[in-house]
Amino acid sequence: MTKGDADCRETLITVATPLFAEKGFNGVSVREIAGYASVNISMISYYFGGKEGLYAAVLNKQFAVLKRVAEINTMESDPLKKFELYVRATVARYRKSPYLLRFYTSELTNPTPCFATIVKPAIQGVVKILQETFADGLSHHQFREGLDPTDTALALAGMINFYFLIEPATGELVDHSPERDEELIQHIMDIFSKGVLK
């Protein structure tokens, strides 16, 4: 692939990402994408085999960031520190990839064929790592007995993901600015590790 090919391919992915995120797969035409990218409509078929292939390329790029969670699992840290690293990585991920949550919600509520091949495996990979981390903590008596690792993993993931998901509806209630991220991370870890009871 020449540099020009790579540039055109990357331009199409860059242009298509916000369009697919805002309008969904069915709400965007190849003509619209080509127009915004200032390329001939045939380039979408040439590089991606059509709109479905372009959408898959967009999702692969968006969900690739979840594969980095596996790096946390390889670190020599205690399980609670790994959970904190996951929370930090999730906050950073949403700051760097503002469209990711839209793809999450769109695919979870109105799945395309890409759900089974791209989205579901990416999400399951993260949940499995969190499960394993919690199970490790249980085996070392770091966490309270009787808690299910899967439910615990989903609770932690749900807490941080939901915080960013409802941001548009809670802007008047809480400061969602990046300057507050450290405070947010500490609050999530405090709630997760200590609960809310006095």
Image (cartoon, rainbow, N blue to C red):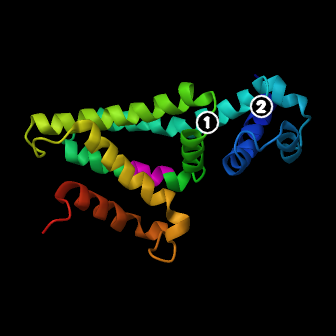
Range of residues picked out in magenta = 88-93
By secondary structure, the bulk of the magenta-drawn segment is best described as helix
Examine the image and state in which quarter residue 143 appears: top left
- Residue, x 39% and y 38% (percent of image)? 69
Q: Position of residue 45 (x, y in %)?
A: 83, 25
- Residue, x 53% and y 33% (percent of image)? 119
- Residue, x 61% and y 39% (percent of image)? 110
In the depicted structure, whether residue 132 falls above or below residue 106: above
Query: How many numbered marks have been drawn onto this rendered protein structure?
Result: 2
191 vs 66, nearest the viewer:
191
Examine the image and state in which quarter residue 10 appears: top right
The quarter in which the C terminus is drawn is bottom left
Q: Position of residue 167 (x, y in %)?
A: 51, 64
Give, as a three-letter code, the residue at label 2. Lys
Q: Which residue in the structure is indicated by mark 2? A: 51
Q: Which residue in the structure is indicated by mark 1? A: 59
**Residue 106 seen from this side:** yes
The quarter in which the N terminus is drawn is top right
**Residue 76 seen from this side:** no
167 vs 182, nearest the viewer:
167
Give, as a three-letter code, the residue at label 1. Leu
**Mark 2 neighbour density, 10 Å: few (under 14) some (14–19) many (20 or more):** some
In three-dimensional space, the C-alpha distance between marks 2 and 1, rounded to whole angstroms, equals: 12 Å
**Callout 1: helix, strand or loop?**
helix
**Callout 2: helix, strand or loop?**
helix
Q: Residue furthest left?
A: 141
11 vs 36, nearest the viewer:
36
Examine the image and state in which quarter residue 51 appears: top right
Q: Residue furthest bottom?
A: 172
Q: Position of residue 141 (x, y in %)?
A: 7, 41
Position of residue 101 in the picture relative to residue 51 (left or right): left
Going from the N terminus, do you reach mark 2 or mark 1 first? 2
